[in-house]
Image (tube, rainbow, N blue to C red):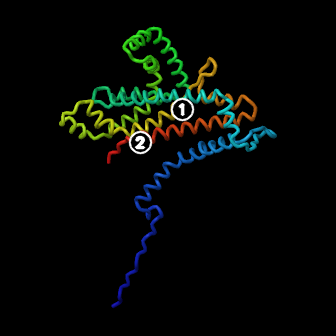
């Protein structure tokens, strides 16, 4: 009898992707999704940032139709901070606007998000209403809304005079500086609502991530609504507050306005006019202004994050 010989069947070789374990596949797809952002960061942020830093350290001049820089150290920074007295004043204005706007934006965004998170009919419609400013805040819609806002502001001031409110608050004993700040917030409520749409979405997602069992336990223990907010809602959304603070601070500095003579213009426009309306040497001055403004924004975000992060509660 002939012995039957079994021939081993060769299995097809697995591809490099199938040989990877789950953690490596997850890391690979994470990198693929981040790749467009990473390309934009390198070519549209880091590269211009490095060029701006180099221009700020050089004396720029036009040679044969091309810009040429001669390294002069921190002389441009000395001119910006020492000779040009307007820049430091405008920088202080930007910081003052940020300190006034950001806390009020966070408060309004959290308040509106809590209202939109409730259970009632038409909730989806009202959520869409507050998302519309995010969608329309681009291109020509921005200019159209700005014109409507100007007309709305003029009509509101003519119909609803805030003088009576200001007099009432002053007579109640509240300091005049605080009164002026409160009246300013009321007048600028249109700007606040249109600029805190992203924060509202972030807070809404944070509120929906809170487990309903926590509120049920608080209700069984007899906690009031204020105690529930202070002991449950506020600690649970504290990471979202930190994220919204970073976004709001960066947004406030990006859209800061300064007073130049009798006109009000964006801080970026002020720097752009100095950079491009003068001789080639003003490129170095403008680059120094831009880099100082960027560094001030970065330091402010870092300091605020360092302070607020100590009170952030992370739920495992």
Which dot, 1 or 2, sits closer to the camera? 2
Question: How many callouts does the rendering have?
Answer: 2
Q: Is residue 198 left or right of residue 92?
A: left
User: Residue 227, relative to residue 171: is it above or below?
Assistant: below
Q: Residues within 10 Å of mark 1 (few under 14, many from 20)?
A: many
- How far across and how far down the image is residue 20, in percent? 44, 62
Q: Secondary structure at mark 1?
A: helix
The residue depicted at 46 percent of the width and 51 percent of the height is 30
User: Residue 185, relative to residue 157: is it above or below?
Assistant: below
User: Residue 309, relative to residue 145: is it above or below?
Assistant: below
Of the pair 306 and 203, the residue shown nearer to us: 306
**What numbered label is drawn on residue 190?**
none
The residue depicted at 65 percent of the width and 33 percent of the height is 81
- How far across and how far down the image is residue 199, in percent? 42, 33
Quadrant for the N terminus in the image:
bottom left
- How far across and how far down the image is residue 253, in percent? 54, 32
- Label 1 and label 2: CA atoms lie apart by 21 Å
Would you identify the image quadrant in which residue 262 lies?
top right
The residue depicted at 49 percent of the width and 28 percent of the height is 136
Q: Is residue 299 left or right of residue 271?
A: left
* Contact, mark 1 vs mark 2 (Cβ under 8 Å): no
Residue 128 visible here: no
Q: Residues within 10 Å of mark 2 (few under 14, many from 20)?
A: some
Would you identify the image quadrant in which residue 62 lies?
top right
Residue 253 visible here: yes
Most distant residue in the bottom direction:
1
Residue labelled with disc 1: 253
The residue depicted at 53 percent of the width and 49 percent of the height is 35
**What numbered label is drawn on residue 309?**
2
Of the pair 207 and 11, the residue shown nearer to us: 207
């Amino acid at each position: 009898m002939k012995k039957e010989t079994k021939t081993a069947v060769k299995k097809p070789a697995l591809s490099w992707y199938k040989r990877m374990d789950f953690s490596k596949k997850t890391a690979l797809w994470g990198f693929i999704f981040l790749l467009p952002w990473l390309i934009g960061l390198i070519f549209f942020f880091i590269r211009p940032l490095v060029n701006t830093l180099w221009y700020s350290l050089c004396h720029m001049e036009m040679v044969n139709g091309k810009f040429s820089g001669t390294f002069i150290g921190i002389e441009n920074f000395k001119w910006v901070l020492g000779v040009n007295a307007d820049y430091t004043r405008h920088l202080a204005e930007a910081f003052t606007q940020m300190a006034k706007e950001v806390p009020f934006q966070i408060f309004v965004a959290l308040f509106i998000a809590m209202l939109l998170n409730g259970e009632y009919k038409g909730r989806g419609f009202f959520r869409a209403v507050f998302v519309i400013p995010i969608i329309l805040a681009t291109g020509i819609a921005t200019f159209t809304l700005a014109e409507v806002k100007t007309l709305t502001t003029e009509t509101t001031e003519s119909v609803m005079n805030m003088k009576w409110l200001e007099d009432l608050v002053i007579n109640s004993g509240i300091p005049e500086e605080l009164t002026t700040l409160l009246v300013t917030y009321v007048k600028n409520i249109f700007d606040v609502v249109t600029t805190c749409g992203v924060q509202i979405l972030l807070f809404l997602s944070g509120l929906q991530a809170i487990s309903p069992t926590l509120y049920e336990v608080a209700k069984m223990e007899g906690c009031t609504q204020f105690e529930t907010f202070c002991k449950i809602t506020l600690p649970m959304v504290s990471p979202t507050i930190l994220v919204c603070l970073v976004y709001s601070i960066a947004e406030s500095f990006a859209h800061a306005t300064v007073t130049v003579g009798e006109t009000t213009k964006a801080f970026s426009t002020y720097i752009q006019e100095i950079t491009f309306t003068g001789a080639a040497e003003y490129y170095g001055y403008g680059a120094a202004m831009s880099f100082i403004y960027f560094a001030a924004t970065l330091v402010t975000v870092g300091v605020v994050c360092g302070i607020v992060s100590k009170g952030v509660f992370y739920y495992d």
